[in-house]
Amino acid sequence: MERFAALLDALVYTRSRNGKLTLIENYLRSTRDPDRGWALAALTGALDFAAVKASTVRNLLFERVDPVLFTLSRDYVGDTAETASLLWPEPAAPRGAAPSVDEAVTALAGMTRASAPRELAGLLDRLDASGRYALLKLATGAMRIGISARLAKVAFAQAFGVSVDDVEEYWHGQYAPYLPLFDWAANGAAPPTGDDLPLFRPFMLAHPLEDGAALDLADYAAEWKWDGIRVQLVSTGAETRVYSRSGDDISATFPEITGSFARRGVVDGELLVRGSHQGGSDGGAASFNALQQRLGRKTVSKAMLADYPAFVRLYDILIDGEEDLRMLAWEQRRVLLEEFAAPLDPARFDLSAVIPASSFEELAAIRDRARDEAIEGVMLKRRDSPYVAGRRTGLWYKWKRDPLLIDCVLMYAQRGNGKRSSFYSDFTFGCWDGDPDAGADLLPVGKAYFGFTDAELKLLDSHVRAHTVNRFGPVRETDRSLVLEVAFDSVHASKRHKSGLAMRFPRIARIRSDKPAHEADRIETLRNLVHD
Amino acid sequence: MEPGRSAPIVLAMAAPFSWLRPDPAGLYIVPADCWIDPSRPVGTALVTHGHADHARGGHQRTIATPATLAIMALRYGTGEGAMACRYGESTALAGGVRATYFPAGHVLGSAQILLEHAGERVVVTGDYKRRADPTCPPFQPVACDLFVTEATFGLPVFRHPPIEREIGKLLAARNANPARCMLVGAYALGKAQRVIAELRLAGYSEPVWIHGAMERMCRLYEECGIDLGELRLVAGAPKGALEGQIVLCPPAALNDRWSRRLPDPLTAMASGWMQVRQRARQRNVELPLVISDHADWDELTGTITEINPGESWITHGREDALLRWCELNQRRARALALVGYEDEDD
């Protein structure tokens, strides 16, 4: 565990991508199985111990430290595991040998809700603060050390001199501690295969199109950017799965989709709910709000299926039957996708139409009208691009419509997590419910925690500290003197908020220190922008 | 007043410590018309130590220890209205208030101020620590009725490790990276000199390189009799000369253009905040050194227990947690909302 703890600490303090890669590579090369496999799983967030949650750790600490002092500390440190590692009382008796990663993982996996507090305490007593941090991170996930799964896979590939695309491919269907994967990469054994399993393939992603950039539509095809969730449908013929953008299996949430797709292959598309919001009746899709009713459910009622029928708007094909199509050009894949989709149930599957624009200027004009159609924007895909994992420059672009802007007043602020743990960085803002000079009040209309630069964050943080009028636990209420220009993609009716409105993707566009609070916008203005 | 009601009876005896008024600009001593560490220019200021957030320029009269006055003169260029008060010496203020200065162990010249008036004894700590420091005399516990304490590191997660361990980390990193320059961010007053003095105690006899902004303060320490060994200025040194060397600079210069002249610097920072991983990350620090000139949680709570005052006021820092500790230990306490004290540079 000491080596893993030292790796985590070094990763925390190493900023450069290459520095992190070197640290992980060295660890993987110099650590034995199965410890290194468990560590890799921990770094990529692949471990889950049902019996140990953040609340388990919290409760364990509440038995040893005053809960108020723990909460104040957690609020400051910004991380439960780190707080607990620092507050854990050192045992009076000298501690035994530190557990190995394998011993810790085996113990964590064997814990029940009832036994976890005692067993976890036993492990913590055998570690120093740095080891306790590593153990708690291992147990609860949420590493927050800036290691993406992708980075860990690159490190794995570089450590053993194998191709990262192969690593991505073989990774799925493998489980920690990945012994066959290490055997393949480190010892030259045959690669692990998963032909008979409906495995996830890494998504191809798009870069945002920079302002002012123009593309030649002879090279790029345009499609609408639908406001749903990206999914990958994988079928072996016998079994079908729906994967989300992050590679999570969400098949159980959408039984009507898995139930109507049984053709061996892998396709890529947008999951939406039927309706006439996005693009009108021709568009055929409801708002994201409607889709949200369906997300995150483990079981789905009949009423849900009837009220919010899901479908997938297909835009790419990766594998047809036995044949991997990913190296073909987008144009060729598109033809094959149309053939593949033709026999599918039209109630559950349709094709994302190609926008017939002859020039970039024409496309720009079409995009400008997208807001009226409640569509997020357009996608541009290079006609000759293969389907490659991740975000590659020059191949796919997303070109969102320009955001809406409104002036709001800062009302509440809360400290952030992780890197922002000491900064007030989550901001709740409001608009006037009438004429502020005639006694109108501010009602919260949204919350944002990005959009500002680091320098602006410092400014906002010191404003909050100097203008606090009330504290509610971690939340500070400010004197409502600062105007923030908030950018957002759209606004919808919502029962969740007192103002009756909910914004999509709100972010702080500008700090309007120059504008007096009573000149901020009224709720009316925002309500007039609702397109539901 | 409503008709038919008599005027309220004014009690002859004043409430305890009513002669001391916490104001957002600092602690105000009413009968003496004096302020302690005021954040704006006033008539008479009692200054605990030379850090800029406590010692500001522009007062008509400043009462502080000789070292603190020297530091202020260095920073603000003038010694006008300065009145020296040595450790253990008393000064009679107006209105029957007596002020006595005692070592606070924070930085060179730092003092706690004992105020005596109307039979009540009040100690204002300013910033303090209880660990040994080769650059200033140790904190001296002073019995009092009211203890006005700082709380910069007033959370139980802050337990500063022994400084020898942190200096050892720095020397080990130097040995492991002979081609890199060890760049240590340290506050120019107090922290920098303490790190240098501790390096010397650990047997490090090579020259220590310093940023130009630290030169005058280091010289002042030497004039006060604190031996810092050989110091050299980074300015003008050939790049190659700094490989494997230890360089000290103010925290703000760590990630500034200034540090680009150094050969592949390994960025370290000497601060109590380095205890928290994400705080070190915010500073782009590769080697966090948990070295603080403030009392940690155990020192803060231990000192209140040791002094055992009737009441404690908590001036600045993480006062919520220390207030809670007082509550749990059935000690009377209140938090003062003083503005303008910054603790980020420790």
Image (tube, coloured by chain):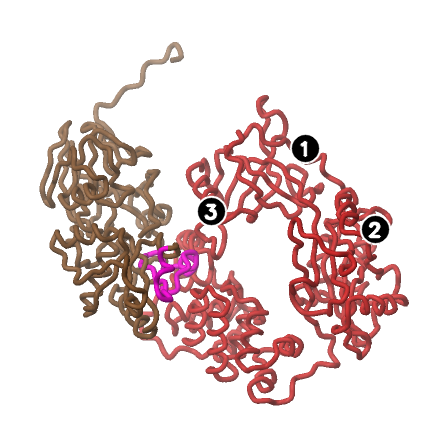
Chain colours: A red, B brown
For residue A435, side relative to residue B275 (left or right): right
The local secondary structure at tag 1 comes to helix
2 and 3 marks in contact (CB < 8 Å): no
In this rendered view, identify the residue nearer to me: B274 or A259: B274
The secondary element bearing badge 3 is classed as helix
Residue indicated by mark 1? A525
Q: Residues within 10 Å of mark 3 (few under 14, many from 20)?
A: few
Using the rendered view, name the quadrant where residue A151 is placed: bottom right
Query: Which residue matches tag 2?
Result: A283
Which image quadrant for residue A156?
Answer: bottom right
Tell me where residue B156 appears, x and y as whole percent: 35, 56
Q: Which mark is residue A455?
A: 3
Dot 1 crowding, Cα within 10 Å, few <14, some 14–19, many 20+: few
| Highlighted range, magenta | B258-287
Q: Nearer the viewer, mark 1 or mark 3?
A: 3
Q: CA distance from mark 1 to mark 3?
A: 30 Å
Looking at this view, is A366 or B262 the one in front? B262
